[in-house]
Amino acid sequence: SSYTNYFTKLEAKIKKYNIKPKNIYNIDKKGFIIGVLSKARRIFIKQALLSS
């Protein structure tokens, strides 16, 4: 499912980048809408984008 896929990828990134719980935040009061992110624009540092 979309939720399982999302949380599997999220867990992998949290481990890869050693993200601490104190640095994880909610997005907004409505919560996170799975599937909408693919339509959103994102800003990356080019080097980080090419290295992943």
Image (spheres, grey):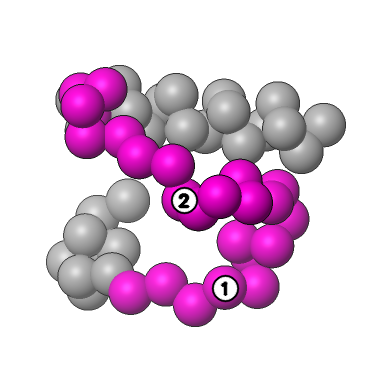
User: Looking at the picture, does residue 34 appear above or below residue 7?
Assistant: below
Give the mark nearest the N terminus, 1 or 2.
2
The answer to whether residue 3 is left or right of residue 10 is right
Predominant secondary structure, magenta span: loop
Residue placed at 46% from the left, 50% from the top? 27
Judge the density around disc 1: few (<14), some (14-19), many (≥20) Cα neighbours within 10 Å: few
- At which x and y percent is residue 26? 44, 42
Q: Quadrant of the N terminus?
A: top right
Residue placed at 21% from the left, 27% from the top? 22
- The secondary element bearing badge 1 is classed as loop
Q: How many marks?
A: 2
Residue closer to the observer: 19 or 16: 19
- At which x and y percent is residue 45? 20, 70
Residue placed at 61% from the left, 46% from the top? 31
**Tag nearer the camera, 1 or 2:** 2
- At which x and y percent is residue 36? 69, 62
In this view, the residue farthest toward the front is 29
Q: Which mark is residue 27?
A: 2
Circle 2: residue type: Ile
The answer to whether residue 1 is left or right of residue 52 is right
Q: Which mark is residue 26?
A: none
- The residue segment tinted magenta is 19-43
